[in-house]
Image (spheres, rainbow, N blue to C red):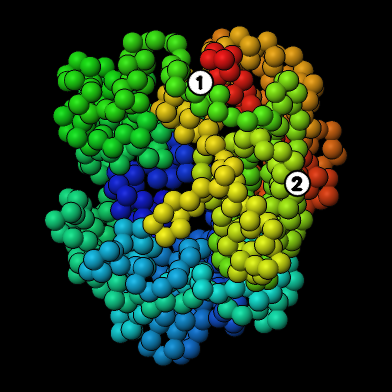
Amino acid sequence: MKPRYLTKSRFKAALECPTKLYYYGKSEYANLMNDDDFMQALCEGGYQVGELAKYYFPGGHDIKSLGYEESIDETNELLKQENVIIYEAAIRFEHTFIRVDVLKKEGKRIELIEVKAKSFKKRDEFSNASGEYIDKKWYPYLADVAFQTWVMERALPGHEIVPFLMLTDKNKKATVDGLNQLFRIKRDARARIEVFPAAEITADNMGEPILAQINVSEWVQKIFRGDEFDPRKKSREEQKDFESRIQEYGRFYSRDEKYPMAVGARCKHCEYQNTKHPDKLSGIEECWRAQFGEDYDPNAPHIFDIWNFRKAEKLIEKKIISFADLYDLLDPSVYLNERQLLQVLKIHTQDPTESIKPELRNEMNSWTFPLHFIDFETSMVALPFTKGRKPYEQTAFQFSAHTLHKDGRIKHYEWIDANQGIFPNFEFVKQLKAVLDKDEGTIFRYAAHENTVLNQIKHQMIDDDESRYGDLIEWIETITEWNDGKTRVAGPRNMVDMLELVRKFYYHPLMKGSNSIKAVLPAVMSAGDSIREKYSKPLVFGTYLKDRVLYELDTRTGKPVNPYYLLPSQYGDLDLNEDDIVFQEAEVQQGGAALIAYGKLQFTDMMDEERQALTRALLQYCELDTLAMVMIYEHWKGVLL
């Protein structure tokens, strides 16, 4: 029987909720994080950071054995040397097992180096505002190192264990082009991630160090002493000392026993739910049924579904978890704001109609034609793609713009630069200005992203050469808003945020608790005849969406299919061997997939045919984002004007 060890990833899950250990790794339970962890690391460049760190410690031995015993035996043999560097060192103590990213042994002193694709700027950012305790956002990283330190101190008595975090240094700029692209990524025969160098790694192509090695001994000791958080604000689990938690969680995991834990607001983000995999078991459903009995209905509208709701913990303590409970047991207006109350009322009473406030009409009458609807696709990676850029610096590689004229004509514009090793930002703004600067029409964005990106690029231009980019900087300031000290400043043609308009003036029960454009678009498609009539026919405008039908009814539900799910694969009839395909199906149907697609275009070896297919997929996805904004506007216009 395969041993059940408490590893650092399992301990991390247990710190979030010890009951998760029971569901961890069991294929019969749905797990929303199975792919998300990989996608996030791929988006951020975490795999490249881990591989780069090894080259900061040359001459090391890489433990590639996958089995527990083989990797432990190989590590122990290497540790007999007086001085040695080991990558992925395998260490076991009782029911705990860790793999150390980099272990550097010099006599009896061992440096334990945990590599993270997280940015770091100054040492005091580990502390909270008071400086006395650990900042909550840093705790998972420091607790990870503390866990490894605890294991190593017991597995290797007589040695001094010095813990470090190795992080991307936001004070440093890449001194070479292509640092990110030095490392390629693929899945091996077992579907495991394999990172390999694209060329021989040398001091010249690595450039100056961009990772920082930070001694975190004092923070680890804080955790060991129980001084990591204000004792008045600790949860019941956090009140236990660190060693006790390791031993207790390890025992439960090794015995495959479920840790008894009360449900709470933290359950909202639990990954063990079957929303995407209805054929699998739901861990969260088991937990809630254990707490509330067999009468618990997982399909009933839950308080977690309420938009932007911050009082879930109070209601759970009162045994109120559904919309029906809200109405049966108390006055919901005491707990809900106007927007939340509207959502709960419509869903609870099964009212299928939309709600549009007439004040939206005044907003719409203030807009100037032609109307421009824009959307950006961007990337922020740990290791810069190009020289002169810092870790996690914004990269804007694509935009889409739909222009709606007063006479109803619609024209689509697009731009993308997915070429490897090109910093696209300044050309991006130049091309965007060429589209939007032809008139004084109102410009629309959905959420703050476009405004944030343009302001970040403005600062990049100022840092690089303000005199050279003066015209573009001035233009950015005409269409954005920003903080000038304590004052909020807005340009004369400041973009209109459609998300804010939705929040203030529009709601449809199909949106449930979301104001995302992916939720609003299907809602407006269900609400009005004009959208059905126009988009059930092939589009007469557009680029990749031209001639496509975007309104199709789902025969099971009788409601329109979300157009994002109608976007076709771009592989088509290409003669591509499945083993050579990096991005399965070439489908980009949401923002995370767009980041993955761009990242793979940057740092993955792929055939030209697949590169072209991925580029087309990115273009059609971004095109639909701005067309969705047009469709929402058209629906509002049909109702109000």
Tell me the kind of residue under disc 2: Ala
Of residue 68 and residue 552, the one placed in the foreground of this image is 552
Residue 457 in percent (x, y) is at: 61, 58
Instruction: Tell me which label, 2 or 1, sits earlier in the chain.
Output: 1
Q: Quadrant of residue 456?
A: bottom right
Quarter placement of the C terminus: top right
Of residue 550 and residue 91, the one placed in the foreground of this image is 550
Q: For numbered disc 1, what is the local secondary structure?
A: helix
Q: For numbered disc 2, what is the local secondary structure?
A: helix
Q: Name the residue tied to disc 1.
A: 361
Residue for point 40% across, 82% down:
110
> Can I make out residue 622 in this image?
no
Query: Which numbered dot is residue 434?
Result: 2
Residue for point 71% across, 47% down:
432
Of residue 450 and residue 320, the one placed in the foreground of this image is 450
Is there CB contact under 8 Å for labels 2 and 1? no
